Amino acid sequence: MPIPVITVAQMREWEKSTWAAGQAETEVIRRVGKTLAQRALQLTQPGQLILLLAGKGHNGDDARAAREHLADRQVELLDVAVPETDLPKLDAALAKRPALVVDALFGIGLNRPLDEPWIKFITRTNQAGLPVLAVDVPSGLNADTGETFGAAIEASVTLAVGAPKEGLLHVVAWPF
């Protein structure tokens, strides 16, 4: 059976219909968090370290919700609001060589070029050369076109929420 591939606008309509049907955002975030944790568990071994990079949007909420389902893993949560302030924390966390980095910095709502501190933060994450599980779309990627907003997380695996987004299927020459 074919899987639908959707645009950001279609996902927004899907969300709107979901909320209109009485589904609570908190319940959806809880379910996505649980699914995210299940995928992270499949990609790691008991006792290994998982680094959660959580932004301030719903992708970050998904990562925070996943944390409670990762009981037999070491988990470090880095809430990232100001990338220039949080860069030393990222460096310290990456120096521990986590088995998996969960990218939940930005989701499909990102629609502008990233400023230099965010580009530096994403570049530093990529330079670590660690496996990355992205939530919905890799941070910095345009979910409709596949182009970057200056830099994008180089995800090993992307857990699409709802359905894969158009931008995940486009081959674009990234500027790195």
Image: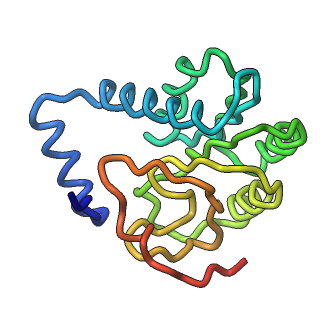
Q: Position of residue 171 (x, y in %)?
A: 50, 80
Q: Position of residue 129 (x, y in %)?
A: 80, 56
The residue closer to the viewer here, 119 or 133, is 133
* Quadrant of the snapshot with the N terminus: bottom left
Residue ranking furthest to the bottom: 173
Residue depicted at 47% across the width and 74% down the height:
146
Residue depicted at 82% across the width and 37% down the height:
93
* Quadrant of the snapshot with the C terminus: bottom right
In the displayed structure, would residue 21 be above or below residue 88? above
The number of callouts visible is 0
User: Which of the 4 quarters of the picture holds residue 20?
Assistant: top left
Q: Is 150 left or right of 63, judged from the image as shown?
A: right
In the displayed structure, would residue 125 be above or below residue 29? below
The residue closer to the viewer here, 85 or 124, is 124
- Report the coloring of the rendering: rainbow
Q: Position of residue 52 (x, y in %)?
A: 65, 36
Q: Is 167 left or right of 76, judged from the image as shown?
A: left
Q: Is 61 left or right of 26, judged from the image as shown?
A: right
Residue ranking furthest to the front: 1
User: Which of the 4 quarters of the picture holds residue 32?
Assistant: top left
Q: Position of residue 48 (x, y in %)?
A: 76, 28
Residue depicted at 65% across the width and 62% down the height:
154
Residue depicted at 48% across the width and 33% down the height:
61
Q: Is 171 left or right of 45, judged from the image as shown?
A: left
